[in-house]
Image (cartoon, grey):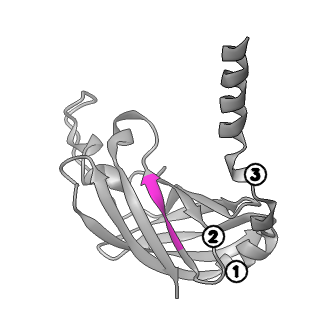
Amino acid sequence: MKILNIFLFILLANTTYRCADDENLIDCNNAVNQMMGRWEGASNYTQPSSARGVTQKFAIDVTSVDDCMFYGISSFEDSFTTFSITGTIDKYGWVEFRETEYANNDGEYTNCHSNGSSWNNPCNRWPYIRYKPGNKFENARFRSDVFTLNGSFKMQGGWSSSVGGTYNLSKI
């Protein structure tokens, strides 16, 4: 019985860690309105090993908001490919957004010359895979006093799940 109580306590503690401090609750509607505008920064790749150490400058332009959600475009200094983004801010200030589809497809991924669907397909590797929709940016905490976001990112699913790292953005 004691083991069960300890297990339940650990489970409960892990599921409510963001809820512990009600003083840090934010108005997510107000926060997404403050997200409006341009944010610039960089992605710092840690995966795959062939991308480790690569820094890619990028920006997001938040163009509209609705409740606790924001929408816009992500762009890159070294590419004409842009993505539509959809993001959320929760009541604790945690920001998450995803590149959902191409806003402008310059072909880095879609025009890659494939040699089939096997594991050695170069289109499923760095650097081509970076330009596939689905990159998820997360684990950043919104702070209106400094207007910076520092978090992590990763590609979702398939061979692309090995692409990831950290990012930072500052409002311009």
- Residue displayed at 19% across by 35% down: 115
Counting from the top left corner in percent of width and height, residue 87 is at 64, 61
Q: Is residue 11 left or right of residue 108?
A: right
What residue type is disc 3 on?
Cys
What residue type is disc 1 on?
Gln
Q: Secondary structure at mark 1?
A: helix
Dot 2 corresponds to which residue?
142
Dot 1 corresponds to which residue?
34
Instruction: Compute the Cα span from label 1 to label 2.
Output: 10 Å
| Residue at the far bottom in the pictured view | 172
| Callout in the foreground (3, 2) | 3
Instruction: Decide: few, some or many residues near mark 2? Use Cα within 10 Å; few <14, some 14-19, many ≥20.
Output: many
Counting from the top left corner in percent of width and height, residue 85 is at 57, 62
- Residue displayed at 33% across by 77% down: 77
Q: Is residue 109 left or right of residue 134?
A: left
Residue 19: mark in rendering? 3
Segment tinted magenta in the rendering: 149-153
